[in-house]
């Protein structure tokens, strides 16, 4: 996972395409504004793999995830991230 700090988003590449999550840091909170996978990667689990990496990163850094994105919120409910 890349932390593209200039664009304020986490990114992974899969099959030559980029899956990303826009974020903001506010103190010890990691706010996930939007998660997006290219059309060709939807339904492949690519966005879920990114969310797992984000959840692991947040845990390591002591950050609480605040999901504003519906996908991120649903993923966290399902996976206990």
Image: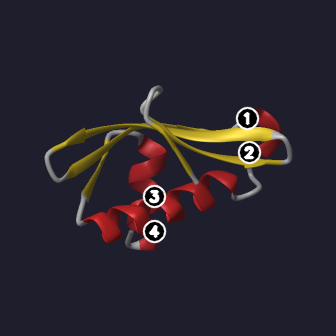
| SS state under label 3 | helix
**Residue plotted at (32% across, 39% down):** 68
Looking at marks 1 and 3 on the same chain, the residue that comes earlier in the sequence is marked by 1
Q: Residue furthest top?
A: 7
Q: State the separation of the CA atoms marked 1 and 3.
A: 18 Å
Q: Which mark is residue 38?
A: 1
Q: Secondary structure at mark 2?
A: loop
- The first of marks 2 and 4 along the sequence is 2
Disc 2/disc 4 C-alpha distance (Å): 18 Å
Tell me which residue sits at (34%, 62%) in the image.
58
- Give the labeled residue for mark 2: 42
Left or right side of 72 for 59:
left
Label 4 residue SS = helix
- Indicate which label's residue lies in the foreground, 3 or 2: 3
Q: Earlier in the sequence, mark 4 or mark 3?
A: 3
Q: Looking at the figure, which quarter contains the N terminus?
A: bottom right
Q: At which x and y percent is residue 74?
A: 44, 55
Q: Is residue 52 above or below residue 29?
A: below
Extreme-left residue of the structure: 27
Residue 47 location, x and y as percent? 62, 51
Quadrant containing the C terminus in the rendered view: bottom left
Taking the spot 14% from the left edge, 46% from the top edge, the residue there is 27
């Amino acid at each position: 996972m890349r932390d593209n700090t200039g664009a304020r988003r986490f990114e992974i590449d899969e099959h030559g395409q980029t899956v990303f999550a826009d974020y903001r840091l506010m103190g010890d909170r990691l706010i996930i504004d939007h998660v997006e996978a290219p059309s060709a990667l939807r339904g492949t689990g690519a966005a879920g793999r990114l969310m797992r990496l984000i959840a692991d990163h947040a845990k390591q850094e002591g950050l609480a995830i605040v999901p504003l994105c519906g996908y991120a919120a649903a993923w966290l409910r399902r996976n206990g991230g």
